[in-house]
Image (cartoon, rainbow, N blue to C red):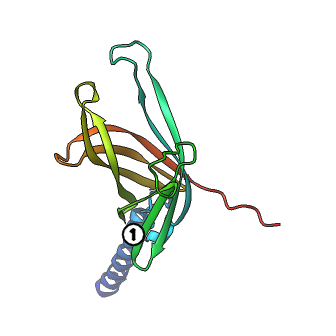
Amino acid sequence: MSKAKTGTCLGALTIAATSVLYILIAAAQEPKESERAPDDKPSSIVGTWNAEARHVVMGSLFQQVHGTRLRNSFVHLKQDGDRLTGYVLAPEDKDERWKSDRTDFRSMKFAKGHLVFEFDIDELNHGWREQTKSKGWIRVEAELKGDRLIGKWGMFEMKSGEELFRGEWEAVRAKEPEKK
């Protein structure tokens, strides 16, 4: 084989090998289905969620056995144009001061698979022997994992912005009623 033909064959082989290598590298960098970023569209979380808030129950900080208090609710998320809105119904925790058996969220954001919403509370009793009464707000932060939102909640004092209490928060997408 002449040097010219050998050079041409090696050049063609190099181009083919480079193309194959490029395809293999690109395929290896393709995220697996389980690693793909969650849908950032608010429509991906619209609907009803069965939610559970948890926090530690203590008679004393120094007791040897601690438990968790669970509170269930139904979170409703809607898309209003480009905006995400929502509210919660907590039928087991009726409070005569609630105006319509529900709490509307004042601030909602959903980006990169993370949901953050806030709502105000009228009265927060805290401090030494709960002698301090102030207004406050609660912020819930959760990550979307399939049909679950998993995260935490924090309770903040309005004047200082200080986080006073916190706990866990989780919600699962409510099942659609079967049509008959």
In the displayed structure, would residue 127 be above or below residue 50? Answer: above
Whether residue 19 sits left or right of residue 176 in the image: it is: left
Where on the picture, by quarter, is residue 11? bottom left
Residue at the (41%, 46%) spot, across then down? 151
Q: Is residue 172 visible?
A: yes
Residue at the (68%, 61%) spot, across then down? 176
Residue 134 coordinates in the image, percent (x, y) = 25, 43
Nearest the eye: 64 or 85: 85
Q: Residue furthest right?
A: 180
Element at label 1: helix
Q: Name the residue under label 1.
A: 26
Q: Residue furthest left?
A: 160
In the displayed structure, would residue 36 be above or below residue 6? Answer: above
Residue at the (76%, 62%) spot, across then down? 178
Residue 103 coordinates in the image, percent (x, y) = 45, 56
Nearest the eye: 68 or 24: 68
Point out the image quarter for the C terminus. bottom right
Residue at the (43%, 20%) spot, across then down? 66
Disc 1 packing (10 Å; few <14; some 14–19; many ≥20): few
Q: Which amino acid does label 1 sit on?
A: Ala
Where on the picture, by quarter, is residue 108? bottom left
